[in-house]
Amino acid sequence: MVAFAFVVGMTVEVVFSGLTLGQSFQSRMLAIPMNMIIARPYGIYRDRLFALIGAEAGRRITRILVDIFSFLTFMVPQYAAVLWVVGANGLQILTACSMVTAMSLAVGRPYGLYMLFCRKLLERKS
């Protein structure tokens, strides 16, 4: 989660939301421990949504939509809190969260696949 969120978050914050490089760097540094703490709960949340909806055995579109929904409902509120802590104003927070919401259509599924890849990689090592 840390590597994935660093790249995506900094791009959104600097390019689209008007945060300074300093604010974005602070946001990313604050997000690292937060992401390390929430990575496992997010994985559990996502897995439960998949099980509840039967997405793993379902159609590809269902898996994509569940990944997007889980990313949005779990990550965006926490992201807004990080931005607030680093001093982003209301408009910057709204813009960044709106962009992340829009980008989740593009990054929700790739992050889900990245997470599955990491899980499989770690399973082989143990």
Image (cartoon, helix red, strand yellow):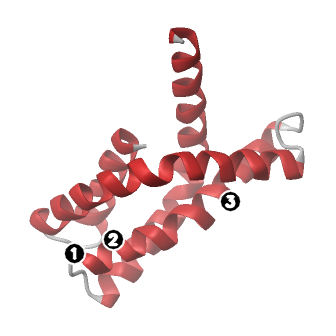
Q: Taking 81 as reference, is 90 above or below it?
A: below
Picture layout, residue 19 above or below residue 105: below
Which quadrant does the C terminus fall into? top right
Which percent across, then down, holds residue 112?
Answer: 60, 40
Residue at position x 38%, y 78% from top? 95
Instruction: Give the left or right position of residue 52, taking residue 102 as reference.
Output: right
Q: Nearer the viewer, mark 3 or mark 2?
A: 2
CB-based contact (under 8 Å), mark 1 and mark 2: yes
State how many labels appear: 3
Q: CA distance from mark 1 to mark 2?
A: 6 Å
Amino acid type at image mark 1: Val
Residue 50 x/y as whole percent:
79, 46
Tag 1 secondary structure = loop
Front residue (pair 42, 3): 42
Residues packed near mark 3 inside 10 Å, few (<14), some (14 to 19) or many (20 plus): some
Mark linked to residue 115: none
* Image spot of residue 30 (x, y percent): 26, 61
Kind of element beneath mark 3: helix
- Residue type for callout 2: Val
Q: Which residue is mark 1?
A: 86
Residue at the image point whose x is 58% and y is 17% from the top:
123
Residue 54, percent from left and from top: 89, 44
- Using the numbered discs, state the Cα–Cα distance from disc 1 to disc 3 in whole angstroms: 26 Å
Closer to the camera, 40 or 52? 40
Q: Is residue 13 above or below residue 84?
A: above
- Residue topped by disc 2: 82
Q: Which mark is residue 69?
A: 3
Q: Residue furthest left?
A: 22
Alpha-carbon span between mark 3 and mark 2: 20 Å
* Type of the residue with mark 3: Phe
Q: Are marks 3 and 2 in contact (CB under 8 Å)?
A: no
